Image (cartoon, grey):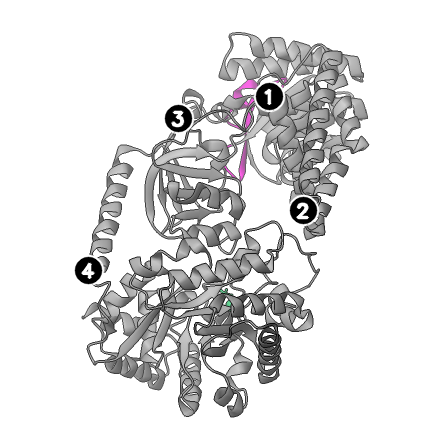
Amino acid sequence: MADTTESESRKLLVRLREAMAGDDAGQARLDKITHLIADSMGTEVCSVYLFRDDETLELCATQGLNTESVHQTRMRIGEGLVGRVAKFGKVVNTPDAPHAKGFRYMPETGEERFSSFLGVPVQRLGEMLGVLVVQSKDAREFSADAVYALEVVAMVIAEMTELGAFVGEGAALSPLHQQAVLIHGTSAQEGAAEGHVWLHEPRVIVTNPIADDPQRELERLNDAVEELRVGVDKMLEVSRDGDTEQLQVLEAYRMFANSKGWMRRMEEDIARGLSAEAAVEKEQSQARARMSQVQDAYLRERLSDLDDLSNRLLRILTGQGANTGAELPENPILIARNIGPGDLLEYGRSLRGIVLEEGSVGSHAAIVARALAIPLVVNAKRITTEALNGDHIMVDGDQGVVHLRPEDTVVGAFRDKIAMHTKAQERYASIRDKPAITTDGQRINMVMNAGLMADLPSLDGSGAEGVGLFRTELQFLVRNQMPKRSELVALYKRVLDAAHGKPVVFRTLDIGSDKVLPYMKPTDEPNPALGWRAIRVGLDKPGVMRMQLQALLRAAEGRPLSIMFPFVAQFEEYRAARAEVEKTIERERILGHVLPADLKIGAMLETPSLAYAPQKFFDEVAFISIGGNDLKQFFFAADRENERVRRRYDTLNVSFLSFIERIVERCAISGTPLSFCGEDAGRPVEAVCLAAMGIRTLSMRPASIGPVKSLLLRVDLGELRKIISDARHRGDQAVRPAVMEYLRGL
Ligand code: PEP
Ligand code: MG
């Protein structure tokens, strides 16, 4: 039999289902499956290769190759035809394998006797698990139908949840989801937490991938799609009077929900023997695979819409996921592929920790997690597949490490770490109300960074003397539509009320670059960090900026107000922005609104150019705050979002510290108040060095105030400055070794 027709592929699936329903487990079941596929497709060989680790594939079952090579034959991804299928996620179909590109002869399997080769990826929702191969002696090219049938079978194999148990002889004995797992991710918020897994969106498990009544499955699919469409229409109805951008997103949803191509492909899958949910998942898998290849941000968004719709459809079909009635476990640690800031805020402080499979340090979820001071690890590969609801889990936000179902020894060591954290917190609480005065009598003003109402309680708890940076864009980022002016007035008022007279510096909207508002059209820029962002957007399209300035002036209700413009690269921009404020004030005056008792208009110094602005700029500006995160990335030309380079240049570098010193000198000439509000202000060693260079106001995350103050109380800034100067005169580029030696000796 050279080909497999549609009904034959269904027959194959029915036989496969019987095989899977039998009592055989693990290896025996996989052996039976390879036998059955070879038999049904009329090939001499059928083999399953599965990933052993990220790089290596292992032959796990075969019909037709030497059985001694099972669990012995291994290859690296990209190696041989099998390795190529795994590497590129694409089908290889050739009548003459020994002469095909990439062929590698493996004598132990005896495969040189086989001419034709058909290999398809085994993947689940875009995750590559292995390769399924059939081979035959006669030189034939498999038909499109045969390829399709094998792909469908590969999908069913991927669904076998015990898949991991087939790899390696030892591993065959230990079922997945019971072993201890250590996952290395990236730290996005420090802290340590122990608790139990709470899956934000539990993965839908398809227990019936194969069905024998296609008609019935088609009806189920149609009913579910209808329910989905009604749901999307309802969402559209609700947001009719919302803004147009959000409507556009929903319209795109509706377009997908009504897409004929999507429906047709799923109907074909069902005709070939898949159940309705397996058909949805197959299309979803392919969309995910495409998603990983697409560079264009807009297209990726659309594919992710489709992914989201597929999830909804799966939930409708299986009744799993949403509204399962499960309750949050004790000390919940949230696990998700990714999560929006709105969803995260809904959980609020009930969470002990967060682990995301994707996400990034600068993501909106990370910003919220930081505001809530919840330890967060991002980039935790495979966490959503490894973790089950209720699993014991420990999150080390300092190191970016996650221990899932940890062994006793790990539990002990981790609890010691948590205890140390608690002790340190007690120590910080004891110095909370003490001013930060160094041993040589220098007083450092300790203020905090904020951006959400959730941050404000920390103003008392941390001992901060005010808010040195209120990032107003967070309010815009966590919503799915542009906030109204009246909402902003109410919010800023609440912020000022909560500050109880302590100063608050509001930074105007800093969008663009990594901060893209979900409801604004994305601009396609080759280099967003150097592109149309922050004050550049504000000056070119002043509508939103004016609305925000008005809201700030009104919220002050006669109280003192400080406004700061982000990303000012030259004097002219500051002047133009200040002129906008003055115009707004004039309008407010005419409208009869009360004006702030005292208004200070400052600028953020985030580009090296501003440090060399004319002296008149320093004379005119009310205050300057160094945005060290951006300033450092432009000073060293090292992207702050790029894991490869973002830690390459140390803040404690003679060049950078000398540059800071220069800014301090320029401000001193005009008596311009200067602060530093980048992340480095919250790192104790960096913070004391910044103070040594002359910075007298440090603005940082509330949780950093204790550790930074604790060190400041013990250092002599004069001595520290001399150490830095000596390093410079010696010709050292790195200052850290000498600084650390001094600090260790305290
Ligand atoms: C900075 O750049 O240092 C800063 C404080 O602003 P943001 O991190 O919001 O860009
Ligand atoms: Mg910045």
State left or right for residue 359 relative to residue 375: right
Examine the rendered structure and indicate whether residue 392 appears above or below residue 566.
above
Q: Residue at x 77, y 33 (%)?
A: 258
Task: Identify residue for label 2.
Answer: 301
User: How far, Cα to Cα, is label 3 from label 2?
Assistant: 35 Å
Q: Earlier in the sequence, mark 1 or mark 4?
A: 1
Q: Nearer the viewer, residue 379 or 261?
A: 261
Q: Are marks 3 and 2 in contact (CB under 8 Å)?
A: no
User: How far, Cα to Cα, is label 1 from label 2?
Assistant: 26 Å
Magenta stretch containing residue 632, yes or no?
Answer: no
Q: Are marks 3 and 4 in contact (CB under 8 Å)?
A: no
User: In the image, which is nearer the foreground, mark 1 or mark 3?
Assistant: 1
Q: Is label 4 in a helix, a strand or a loop?
A: helix
Q: Earlier in the sequence, mark 1 or mark 3?
A: 3
Task: Identify residue for label 4.
Answer: 430
User: How far, Cα to Cα, is label 1 from label 3?
Assistant: 25 Å
Q: How many marks?
A: 4
Q: Nearer the viewer, residue 357 or 164?
A: 357
Give the residue at the far front of this rendering.
Answer: 592
Residue 706 in the image, given as x and y percentages of width and height: 27, 62
In the image, what residue type sits under mark 2? Glu
Examine the rendered structure and indicate whether residue 681 appears above or below residue 153.
below
Classify residue 181 by image quadrant: top left
Q: Is residue 100 visible?
A: no
Q: Is residue 127 visible?
A: yes
Classify residue 20 by image quadrant: top right
Q: Are marks 1 and 4 in contact (CB under 8 Å)?
A: no
User: In the image, which is nearer the foreground, mark 1 or mark 4?
Assistant: 4
Q: Which residues are magenta?
A: 52-73
